[in-house]
Amino acid sequence: MDLYQFTEGIVSWLVGIVNWILNWVGFHGLAGWLGSPDIIKFLTLLGESIVLLAIGFIVAITMIWQERKTLGRLMDRRGAMVVGPAGYFQNIADGLKTLLKEYIIPEKADKTAYNWAPVIMIGSSILLLVAIPLSGRFYMSDLNAGLLFIFAVFSITPFAILMGGWASNNKYSLIGGMRSAAQLISYEIPLLLSMVGVVLLSGSLNIGDIVNAQAESTWFIIPQLIGFIIFMVAIVAEVERIPFDLPEAEAELVEGWWTEYGGMRFGLLMLAEYFRGYAGAAVAVLLFLGGWSGPFLPPEIWFLIKVFIVFFILIWLRGSLMRVRVDQILNIGWKRLLPLAMVNLVIAVVFKTLGWF
Amino acid sequence: MAEMWINMGPQHPMTHGLWNLRVKVDGETILDAEPVIGYLHRGWEKMTENRVYPQIIPMSDRLCYGSSMTWSHLYCMTIENLMGVEVPERAEYIRVIVLELQRIASHLMWLAAFGTDLGLLTVFVYCMRERELFLDLLQSVTGARMTYNYPRIGGVRNDLPPDFGRDCLRTLDHFEKKLDEYEEIFDGSAIFLMRTQDIGILKAADGMNLGVTGATLRGSGVKIDLRKHDPYSVYHELDWDLCTHPDCDCYARYRVRMDEMRMSCQIVRDALKKIPAGPIRVKVPRNAPKRTAFARVEDPRGEGLMYVIGDGTDKPYRLKVRSPIFVTVSAVPIMLIGYKIADVPAIMGSVDMCLGETDR
Amino acid sequence: MQGEMPTVGLSEEAVVEAIKKSFTDGVTVGVVGPRRISARVARSVVYKLCEHLKSALSFEHVSCLSGVDKVDHMEVVYHISSYANECVIEITVDVPSDDPEVDSITPLWGGANWHERETHELFGIRFKNHPKLERLLLPFDYEYFPFRKEFKLRGR
Amino acid sequence: MAKEAKRSRKNPGLTGYVLRPMYATLKETIRATLHRPNTVLYPWEKVELPENYRGRPGLVMERCIGCGICMRICPTGCIELVEIEDKDHGKMRKPQVNLGRCMMCGYCAEYCPKKAMIVTPEYELAASSRQDLIYDPYELQHKYKPGYEVHIVEVLPSELKRGAVEREPGREGKDRPELDDKKCIGCARCAKICPTGAAEMGQVGVNEKGKPIKRPKFDYSKCVGCEQCVENCPRDALTMKEVL
């Protein structure tokens, strides 16, 4: 039983109850319309997306909590600790606080673009969740080219950043937005090239197939170690975390393109940041670390454990590395990662031709 | 992108205080820079003209929040020069010890801020943790954590506490181990080297002409340290070397300060070994003679100088403070021009800003 | 100058002798202590003296430049130090109150730039040939010279 | 002579070098997780203070003689003398401290001749209004513990030259008032104002009209050098003589 059937069951049951009430009241036509398969399908998809959003939200909140606690230990301090068990509800309290903040739009901002940038940001981030399965049975959509879809959606955000940075009418924001565009061209190509090796070995762009291929042979981190490293470096740039968080470089650009966003917009951007962090870690797990495969525990739990471990690496990087400069990220991307990615591709081809996978 | 002026400050994470760096950028490249200061101007020098000599000691603590001991010590030394007072030897040794501990604490605060400027918050907490140990030491001597009010005209306020030598040595041993760890985090990181090497070049000739002093100038390879070349207190009796680095860039300044922390540990150890017994404070006259005097010290940030004119009363006629950062900031444009806007925090972090003494 | 500094330079007496030889009028100079030289200079020769100090006697560094209001006249006090000779010269220049103007030494040492700007705005002493004699610390619309003695503080 | 840089310039690469800081922070993380983190949970636990910690000034009421030295030395001018009813002495002047201006320099305790002003280790001084921060002498009172008072341990320069050892100065180290006999008019204001009773009026003779001529006599063992007599003298007949 997968997520669709599960949700369909619940929806059918609920619709059955409602139909019984409607029939009892006497609205037979409405009950018949509600019971039709199209409506059931629509309601099922709606329910599925709510479940998915809730899970994404919980994972993001947990990630923020994990980041706070882990970063706290990295820095020899405690992190959030007062609200809730071990400070877990602190993020929810912070989220509620952002809701209560004043709603400020800079006077000279381009209002339309300014308002739409966070929407695109959070929208694209939620769209990422659609394509990421938690397990072979817990997914929203099983796309044939799921991997391509994920990275296509990933690449929307620099556009939102550029838009928001331009619309804020602030010099820092503008520079932040421009940096985002510059960063995009530096990491995107090594990222995709590092992925190509995995695609070659598994022979599919479908995420389920890739995971199954790993379950059959071995985790792709073993033949594709170089690819994994390149992927991790590039995904850090992709989700804009600290060695490569140039668009919001705190020390030089205040908060970069976020500078003028306050209140719940800021909260949404923050949430989107962690959605993307979740998506990045999830893709790393799916491509290189065997996805949801693992003994004893349910596959969903295994998947989330692996995601949190990969996210721990991202936090660890943040806790021990400095920010690189904008011209240096181009150097890293083009001069170091790209040749390495080529080498990695050759390795994949050799493995494939030797017939080991 | 067209050229534009960006105001970095007065409220900006890079500033470490309240000042404004106007930079003219073309894209990301800095074409021109102009520091704007004065946001913290308190008229300190004028305020001192209405206070009697001992009352100015706690005020001079407030000149710099990072290293208040050096400033109150400099003030006391200036007034001792003015009054012609001879300070007991034990007091001089105690002063050297607390000054060097203060130097370590100040450099640690600089290192913490430098790490934060480059995007690494972890080091901030680590450095503050170790700074806390030195603050605890200073607190056990002076009774306060930041504004010590410890040196007095003609000596120091009170003697060292009984177990101070033992605690101090233990702290220094622990600290030197931690210093290795910082070097692992900074020097071991390729990103740190990428961010600091060949950035913010200040040639030795430029630096000397622009009046830059202290670790910034020693980072340009000039072997000048006032503790060596204009010795005050008992520095000439202690065994130590000055630290320089020939690279002229941010990395060299970082290296010099790291070496200086080690050297300060050595000075403190040596001073604890050589400290004599005896009186710690001598009574000074209330009124200063009619003449002028000045004193120079090697502040953690550079050369500090105070120039005082006595007019025969118990208040100074004029007290002028030469703050090292005041001059270094005026030399900042030459370090910044031609680099990227992302290098501004690295360069400004490497000169160790302190606005309290700059604006006075 | 990169890297190496001359470690042994002139002694204080030699510096004083050299100044006395080059300047006969308007300069009284003497050694006041170890590594300390004091000089009182007329307004007209201060720039020439500084030029001589910089070029011939290797005084590289302006430590300090302060203005003093002596009610009937003003003074500008230079502390110029030499790394090579390891000594500091304190040059006092008298400036009349009604025409407070003195030659700027910023063309010689860039380090004097902000000191002169500060002295200008706090005491109203003008520095001739200064590249940019503008406000530095005080607000732009400030009308007084707050460090002059005629400016009384409110509190005490 | 100078200490040269230890490390030569490195050619920064991408991998390898990144691992060293990561290893260093990981060690620190494990240490922080196994032991406890370095931070102090402030409202629940507090840092131990050393004995001589300088918090707010305190007052030992019985010792205070109201000489006003603390008021005079205070750099911020936060101490004022106010009149209160004392049980034994009737009206007395005692210090009142405005903690909103106090900068905890400890000068009042250091210069207090009777060690009535002390430094207490209290540092949590937040109040809800500025008025609450003005501590009158009763609020200022604090339980005395040895170690709260500050002593000036200074030697006279003349003794330093003779190679004296450290000691706390007695009365002879204090500055003392001196009388200029010609200016004195015998108004006895100094004797009235003297908080210690060191100045007493004594008859030194009779003038041509047969009225007694009175002059103050100073008992220097009692004098604390508070300068009140000097300040209140209408004819400036008294000056402080410094003992050096």
Image: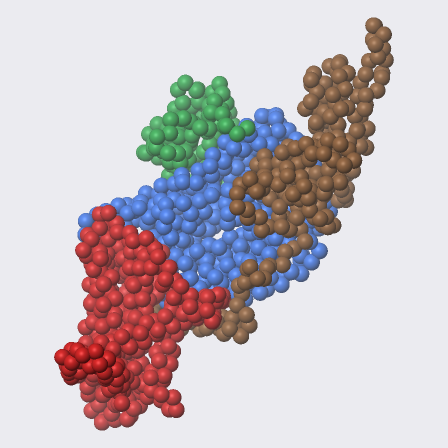
Q: Which image quadrant for residue B255? A: bottom left
- Judge by depth and name the residue closer to the eye, C56 or B125: B125
Give coordinates of residue C130: x percent, y percent: 34, 32
* Colour in which chain D is drawn: brown
Up-down relation of residue D42 to residue A238 (above or below) = above
Quarter containing the N terminus of chain A: bottom left
* Colour in which chain C is drawn: green
Judge from the rendering whether residue D142 lies leftward or rightward of residue A66; answer left or right.
right
Judge from the rendering whether residue C56 lies leftward or rightward of residue D40; answer left or right.
left
Residue at 52 percent across and 48 percent down: it is B67
Q: How many marks?
A: 0
Residue at 70 percent across and 27 percent down: it is D228
On the question of residue B276 being in view, the answer is yes
Residue at 62 percent across and 39 percent down: it is D97
Give coordinates of residue A322: x percent, y percent: 37, 64
Quarter containing the C terminus of chain A: bottom left
Q: How is the image coloured?
A: by chain
* Colour in which chain A is drawn: red
On the question of residue A314 being in view, the answer is no
Residue at 70 percent across and 20 percent down: it is D233
* Colour in which chain B is drawn: blue
Up-down relation of residue B192 to residue B306 (above or below) = below
- Judge by depth and name the residue closer to the eye, B137 or D42: D42
Q: Which image quadrant for residue A267? A: bottom left
Pick out the residue farthest to the top: D209
- Judge by depth and name the residue closer to the eye, B183 or D44: D44
Give coordinates of residue A245: x percent, y percent: 31, 63
Give coordinates of residue B306: x percent, y percent: 52, 37
